[in-house]
Amino acid sequence: MIKKFFGSLSTDLGIDIGTANTLVYAKEKGIVINEPSVVAINTRNDQIIAVGQDAKQMIGKTPPHIIATEPLVDGVVSDFEVAEKMLKHFIDKVHRETFSVFPRPRVVISIPLDITEVERKAVEDAVVSAGAREVFLLEEPMAAAVGARVPIEDSTGNMIVDIGAGTTSIAVISLGGIVASRSLRSAGSELNKDIINYVRDHFNILLGEKTAEDAKIFIGSVHENNERIEAKVRGRDMISGLPREIIITSDHLREAMNRSIQTIIDNVKLVIESTPPELVADIYERGMLLSGGTSLLRGLDKRISEAVSIPVMVVDDPLTVVVRGTGIVLEDIEAASDLFVVAADGLSQ
């Protein structure tokens, strides 16, 4: 009864908690938060200094007693306490404009494919500890398909590849369920590491991860027919130890990211091979959808399409499609009950 009372004063939320960014959808309001999944903590008094964009600006620049940390690795919670504090901060932020003193919202939250029961329980517990009264778990490719307005309840096959920062989820969806799928830890963060390693090996310069990510966003390309672009990057010379600036091109980045991109393509092929022929025929006709921030890499849709001989399209606003999916589900949770993942205790949350 008490939970229902506080719930009546709370705004139900849809959350896409990702390795790089956390997005929050408030019922009847839309997307209200889009912040990096970073928390800065003062270890002397265990107090949070900053969350989100402000905390991200501190990465690599903090004194010893301040730690700017990312509580998720490869899409799953790696630091429970920090993840809980970050989620509580976002939930409280949404409710600051309401009269709710102790917000107890229902929360629909996206989770990666193929995570373990322990990892799934960690997400659920972190959300409950942050103040949610009920938690509903929705797999990322399903959320992305709903957000892209794909008719998932139809008997036709729909294929979606969600490439985020920590994980790549590949799924074939039909009749409201996932028929064939694969999940791999090769995604945006792995591409950043590829760029760092390439520049270190070929130019003897050590780049920071933010510099590598910026280069990927501004000049990154994975198809040989894309226009050649160049950019200046700065890092530490491995020989002299002093700052140094060089010019790298989109050709360099394509070579650097090639192995990881090919891994994603190979797994897309494996999912297609394990899909029933009737659904493959549907996918060939309807095409494949790409979502997630990494899907914005220049030429990625074209390269996958050429590799699998299937039309490939990037969904509208791929960065927010997952949280939009949780928001659509949030509007009628009871009707979407079959889409939720069964919790570790055998009961749907």
Image (cartoon, grey):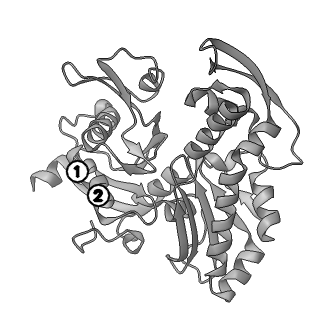
Q: Nearer the viewer, residue 27 or 191?
A: 191
Q: Looking at the figure, which quarter contains the C terminus? A: bottom left
Residue 49 at least partly seen: yes
The structure residue drawn at horizontal position 82% and vertical position 28%, both measured from the top left corner, is: 230
Q: Would you place residue 164 above or below residue 22 in this image?
A: below
Residue type (three-letter) at the residue carrying disc 2: Val
In percent of width and height, residue 219 lies at 76, 34
Residue type (three-letter) at the residue carrying disc 1: Val
In percent of width and height, residue 210 lies at 57, 28
Horizontally, residue 191 falls left or right of residue 308, namely left
The structure residue drawn at horizontal position 28% and vertical position 61%, both measured from the top left corner, is: 118
Crowd band around label 2 with a 10 angstrom C-alpha radius: few (<14), some (14–19), many (20+):
many
In percent of width and height, residue 45 lies at 18, 20
Q: Given the current orientation, which residue lies at the most extreme top position?
A: 242
The structure residue drawn at horizontal position 46% and vertical position 44%, both measured from the top left corner, is: 19
Q: Quadrant of residue 270?
A: bottom right
Residue 317 at least partly seen: no
Are circles 2 and 1 on residues that touch, CB within 8 Å? yes
Horizontally, residue 276 falls left or right of residue 94, namely right
Horizontally, residue 243 falls left or right of residue 37, namely right
Q: Would you place residue 8 above or below residue 247 in this image?
A: below
Q: Looking at the figure, which quarter contains the N terminus? A: bottom left
Which residue in the structure is indicated by mark 1?
128
Q: Would you place residue 21 above or below residue 341 in this image?
A: above
In percent of width and height, residue 224 lies at 86, 48
Q: Nearer the viewer, residue 194 or 298?
A: 194
Q: Nearer the viewer, residue 66 or 245?
A: 245
Which residue in the structure is indicated by mark 2?
135
Q: Tell me the tag on residue 316.
A: none
